[in-house]
Amino acid sequence: MIYYNFKQMQDRLLESLRDDLICVDATIGNGHDTLKLLKKFKNGFVYGFDIQEIAIKNTEKLLRENNFSNYKLILDGHEKMDNYIKKADLIMFNTGYLPKSDKKIKTNKETTLKALEKSISILNNNGIIFFVQYVGHEGSFEEAQVVDEFFKSLNQKNYRVIKTQFFNQINNPPIIYIGEKYE
């Protein structure tokens, strides 16, 4: 069966994982993915990053309303995740900007590349990076090129990477990368 959007792909991936993982939501936005991670990984822990205080506040409110406490939200860039986390099993990214906010505040190729490099350094064996690259906004195609080159450059002896994109969809559908670390 073909999954028609990245949320379906993400759901299928999460269903296949055990429930005690250390997770990172590298771009929390309004907290919907953070909440999804907490619902799935009830015996795990979730770290969430964002550079906007409103994203932290919105996510905190959502998570408290849903009675979760096994998380830490960090007002800092995802490129600094190794300052807060030593090891992780699952790292999720959604690039772009916070929906219904200032579109000038967004991920960019420099910090995203650094965040991916940091992700690899803290990712446990059999760990997974689920990366959604949104394209269509200013700077997104340059960011997508850097992300593509990063994933392509990972040594196949230690990483499996799948890239998925919908070719016949309008309005620049996102590109999805799923990378797994193994030894």
Image (tube, helix red, strand yellow):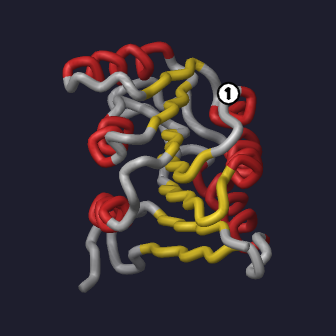
Say how many tags the image has: 1
The quarter holding residue 36 reads top left
The residue at 40%/28% (across/down) is: 70
Where is residue 105 drawn, in percent x and y? 55, 27
Where is residue 139 drawn, in percent x and y? 62, 46
Circle 1: is it few (<14), some (14-19), or many (20+) Cα within 10 Å? few
The quarter holding residue 49 reads top right
The answer to whether 91 appears left or right of 57 in the picture is right
Where is residue 30 drawn, in percent x and y? 35, 29
Residue found farthest to the left:
65
The residue at 79%/75% (across/down) is: 155
Q: Which residue is mark 1?
A: 84
Whether 124 is drawn above or below 32: the answer is: below
Quadrant position of the N terminus in the picture? bottom left
Say which element carries label 1: loop
Q: Nearer the viewer, residue 14 or 146?
A: 14
The residue at 65%/28% (across/down) is: 77
Amino acid, disc 1: Tyr
The answer to whether 36 appears left or right of 103 in the picture is left
Where is residue 93 drawn, in percent x and y? 52, 48
Quadrant position of the C terminus in the picture? bottom right
The residue at 66%/44% (across/down) is: 87
Q: Nearer the viewer, residue 4 or 35?
A: 35
The quarter holding residue 62 reads top left
Residue 53 visible to the viewer: yes
Q: Nearer the viewer, residue 2 or 45?
A: 45
Residue 109 visible to the viewer: no
Residue found farthest to the bottom:
1
Whether 100 is drawn above or below 181: the answer is: above
